[in-house]
């Protein structure tokens, strides 16, 4: 009887998750396709479209996780304690089987959500390993980790040319894979290329006319400068009369 309960439970919950998973699949395909074509254009409109797809993908992913938790709670409450519970308790099954079916179903969907999150963290870790090996001039290992990500994305393997080209490709790959995770500026700052990359890859005159190299970091409040006894300063801003 437990098998029948599980079959019914998965059918009921699959109807809830089906639309979300189809939406997630559609957005993932569009997002992935847009990223592959991003390198070949500097169009602001195209970059905006990629950014919107990134936000849509993130929203659907978060929505899937939230709906998973809410559905598990709702199934427990409505099927066991609500009006449906009256009919459920008339079935020729034990209470342990009723609760067990809910627990197994909820566990399966929770594992699916955890797997999706783990995959995202795995991609981040692989790219970090590639960068570390490139910095230590272990090009073979750096290329191996870089190609793990590229092969997963269905694109061609990277062929080593030189250290500078390898580091540049890893930097680009982090931009593609981690787009929408709000850490691109931190990467550009630690690589020391934030001003150059931002200036060269924007077509907005207002931004170019107002951005300065010192904007790489926020200014330190005067109060904190005084408290530090001069250990902290804003010399980078002072150079530009600020």
Image (cartoon, grey):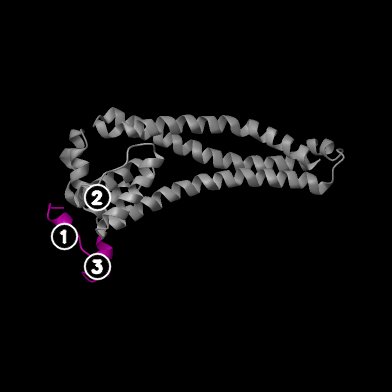
How far separated are the C-alphas under marks 3 and 1? Answer: 14 Å
Residue 231 horizontal/vertical position (percent): 22, 69
Q: What segment is highlighted magenta in the picture?
A: 222-242
Whether residue 69 is situated above or below residue 26 in the rendered picture: below
Secondary structure beneath dot 1 equals helix
Per the image, the residue denoted by label 3 is: 226
How far separated are the C-alphas under marks 2 and 1? Answer: 30 Å
Instruction: Name the one closer to the observer, 219 or 62.
Output: 62
Residue 112 visible in the shown view: yes
Per the image, the residue denoted by label 2 is: 167
Q: Earlier in the sequence, mark 3 or mark 1?
A: 3
Q: Quadrant of the N terminus?
A: top right
Instruction: Name the one closer to the observer, 156 or 201.
Output: 156
* Circle 3 or circle 2, nearest the eye: 2
Q: Residues within 10 Å of mark 3 (few under 14, many from 20)?
A: few
In the shown orientation, is residue 242 left or right of residue 221?
left
* Residue drawn at point x = 69 percent, y = 40 percent: 74
* Circle 2 or circle 1, nearest the eye: 2
Q: Is residue 104 magenta?
A: no
Contact between marks 3 and 1 (CB within 8 A): the answer is: no
Instruction: Name the one closer to the observer, 219 or 193.
Output: 193
Residue 105 disc label = none
């Amino acid at each position: 009887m437990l098998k029948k309960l599980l079959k019914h439970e998965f059918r009921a919950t699959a109807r809830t998750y089906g639309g979300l998973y189809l939406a997630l699949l559609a957005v993932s395909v569009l997002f992935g396709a847009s990223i592959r074509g991003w390198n070949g254009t500097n169009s602001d409109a195209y970059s905006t479209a990629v950014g919107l797809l990134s936000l849509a993908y993130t929203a659907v992913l978060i929505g899937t996780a939230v709906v998973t938790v809410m559905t598990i709670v709702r199934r427990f409450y409505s099927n066991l304690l609500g009006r449906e519970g009256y009919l459920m308790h008339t079935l020729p099954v034990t209470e342990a089987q009723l609760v067990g079916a809910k627990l197994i179903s909820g566990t399966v969907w929770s594992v699916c959500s955890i797997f999706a999150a783990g995959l995202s963290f795995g991609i981040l870790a692989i790219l970090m390993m590639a960068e570390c090996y490139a910095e230590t001039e272990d090009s073979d290992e750096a290329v191996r980790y870089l190609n793990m990500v590229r092969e997963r994305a269905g694109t061609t393997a990277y062929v080593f040319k030189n250290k500078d080209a390898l580091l540049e490709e890893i930097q680009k790959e982090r931009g593609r894979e981690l787009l929408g995770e709000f850490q691109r500026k931190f990467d550009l700052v630690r690589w020391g290329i934030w001003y150059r990359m931002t200036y060269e890859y924007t077509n907005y005159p207002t931004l170019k006319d107002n951005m300065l190299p010192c904007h790489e970091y926020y200014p330190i409040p005067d109060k904190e400068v005084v408290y530090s006894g001069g250990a902290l300063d804003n010399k980078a801003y002072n150079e530009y009369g600020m």
